[in-house]
Amino acid sequence: MPLTCSGLIKKYKLKTRLITVLAVLLLPLLTQAQFTISGTVSEKSITLTGATIKIKNSTAVTTTNTQGKYQFSNLKSGSYTITVSFVGYRTIEKTVQLNSDQTLDFQLNQAAFLAEEVIVRATRANEKSATTYKNISKAEIEENNFGQDLPFILNNTPGVVVTSDAGAGVGYTGIRIRGSDAARVNVTLNGIPYNDSESQGTFWVNMPDFASSVDNIQIQRGVGTSTNGAGAFGGSVNIQTASPSENAYAELNNTFGSFNTLKNTVKVGTGLINNIWSFDGRLSRIKSDGFIDRAASDLKSYFLSGAYHGKNDLLRVNIFSGTEKTYQAWNGIPESRLNGDVQGMNDFIARNYLSDAEAAHLLSSDSRTYNSFTYKDQNDNYQQSHYQALYAKQFNDKFSFNGALHYTDGKGYFEEFKMSQKFSNYGLPPINENGVLRERTDLVRRRWLDNDFYGVTYAFNYQAKSNLNFTVGGAYNEYKGKHYGQVTWAQYASTGDNFRHYYDGKGDKNDFNVYGKANYSPVEQLSLFADLQYRKVTYDITGTDKNLKSLNFGNEYDFFNPKIGATVFLNEESNVYTSFSVANKEPNRDDFTNIKTGLLPKSERLNNIEAGYRFKNNTLSAGINAYGMFYKDQLIFTGEINEFADAYRQNVDKSYRIGVEIDASYIFSSKFAINANAAFSKNKIKDYIDYVSEYDDNGDVVNVFTTSYANPDISFSPKSVLFGELVYKPVKGFAAAIQSKYVSAQFMDNTQNDTRKLDAYWVNNARLGYDFNMAGIRNINIGLLVNNILNRKYESNGYTYSSAYQGTTTTENFYFTQAGTNFLLSLNLKF
């Protein structure tokens, strides 16, 4: 029977409803469909290898292979903006609406000026270097920059532990990477060495608010690639200062927070003038009372930079300087005061012959903020100025050069009040006062350091073929350091005066290195890496030291530091790598000046094995690596002292660090993301001998006790360091983050004694940021950082020593407490 008109209408409506229901049911599947964006990057008809392709507002990033190809996979439908950059070429971007697989090719044009990255390219690692590293972008630095020293901005990276003498991240701060202290972490600024040549440490307090002038940072863990300056035994921190903005700008950055912390920063820049010139400047001041009593800091700095940007060359001149006045808080808190142990404090007072005023101060102070120093001018005063001339030249598409001339001028002193000092310790005769022979006096002294550091760094880069490139580089640097002391006040003056030097010492150090690096890809999936460095160091120490002991050390070292590695690219998103590296390191100044007469320290050697896996797509970036660091003749403290009661380091035959590190970031959605890393390690000395000196009533050493230990933990080397961050962006311009850091227990010496350790701690911070704009102001940022939101009581650093009297051994422990809940509020304006 034929359908009627009404029947046809009913059938049509039913069909329409079925299609609609089916479409609704299939919609989630359609929206969850995953697509790819792929293509090539070229200049005219020549494909470019190693160009960087990023998806804006995500962690998705990749590089072109030897055929100039790239690919992003597993992308949901939607709008994407793709940016492509390559050294020496203009960065371009395209936006694509993705609802199917897309082929997106890019053709780059050579830049009117050379990219700033070429300045640090020779000392940087990349995914073909078979090196374990972490890059920190300018945006990440800005998010975490509330005026604290640079180590606290690096605190969120794998295997890093930071500490602060004042307890709140301003003033004297320290950083350890894989348990290695600052003297074993190589730091460069635009490829120029920053570590102090003699102590080999890094004093971040001399560069207040330097983070405000930094464009990006790369942390290489382990030996890393060849770099300039002191050998990297735990890691290296390679810092590149800010690149110019295309447009003129001005910024006002202000922070106020707990402990009367105040930061004011002014930044200005011309942008590119006639596409050739650029000038940038920064002026900063930071003040803080500190968490610890009287641990105040008064810091000032400036940064000036001017550049000429040619078509094929770049000349940049940087001048920056920092001045610090910091009240000393480096004695720490005695264990008895920290625990509120009155009897323990009274015993401490008796053992250490504290005066009545010192005893009363100890007993009445707060347990977590006690500072033994009460003299009003117990300050550290130092100014350091840097001058850098950086030049880069692109001769053709295969050959380029970058080099630098540099000079650093540093001068300063720390002042301290000392009670009942022997005149003879200052080269002065006793005095006769009304028939009374006085051999001691209260006094105020200053210990000075006046140094100059200058030299040249260079690197030639040659891209022989698309799959083969070479770098030859090196540096020659000279250091001249003067160490001297003055007595500026004395209760009894003897024959001295304010201008007399009671000791004068000199340190002259020349550091030459040359290295050659090569990357070769015999096939597309394999990259081979080799890096050979020769380093020659001469170091002469003359004059007298602080104990008036004559110094006459002449040392010369020849080091060969080879590195080899391979990276296998499994696909566009993942690779595996392995490397073997050797590093050698000379002793520092204290290893010579504090050692017993007649002994000499030996240089240290490290064999480093790294192996890892990396994965990266548009939502997930992850890596896992295993490492082994095997030391020969590592210098460590053993408890032994010299004839002036100074502790010194000794070589131990064999020691090692082995571990696993994990680093990952995952974007759940446009609103949620998580960042996390973990480091697990085992750090051991094969055979260790501990020394304890026994004293008599005159304070003379009458005996030395020794104890042997098999495989104890290396001091200040936590077995676990964990970090996690949850980021929430509910609306445009607003971001909130919860950060969590766990550091397991650390021993303060090498005996693995539970009575001499820092307890594990777990600290949580919260960070809020809101960006918006209004008429006349390009961007307004309001930020809030709340540290230690759960108000945990913890200590991040400390020290210990033991002594014996009449057969009884006493151990003294001292701790550096960190602040409870505290905040920093910032207001940043960009014009």
Image (spheres, grey):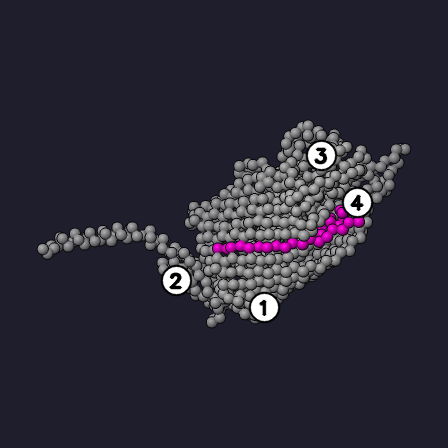
Dot 4 or dot 3, earlier in sequence: 4
Residue designated by label 2? 102
Q: Which mark is residue 547?
A: 4
The answer for how far apart the CA atoms under marks 3 and 1 are is 62 Å
Residue furthest to the top: 343
- Callout 4 touching callout 2 (CB < 8 Å): no
Question: Which secondary structure, mark 2?
Answer: strand
Segment colored magenta:
587-615
Calculate the distance from the C-alpha at mark 4 to the C-alpha at mark 2. 74 Å
Name which of mark 4 and mark 1 comes first in the sequence: 1
Which mark is first along the chain, 2 or 4?
A: 2
Vertical side of 292 occupied by 6: above or below: below
Asked if residue 503 is among those painted magenta in the image, a careful observer would answer no
Q: Residues within 10 Å of mark 1 (few under 14, many from 20)?
A: some
| Residue that label 3 marks | 810
Q: Looking at the rendering, in which quadrant would you find the N terminus?
A: bottom left
- The nearer-to-camera label among 3 and 2 is 3
Q: Residue at x 51, y 55 (%)?
A: 613
Marks 2 and 1, how far apart in space? 35 Å
The kind of residue on which mark 2 rests is: Gln
Q: Say the numbered circle drawn on residue 19.
A: none
Confirm whether residue 191 shows in the render: no
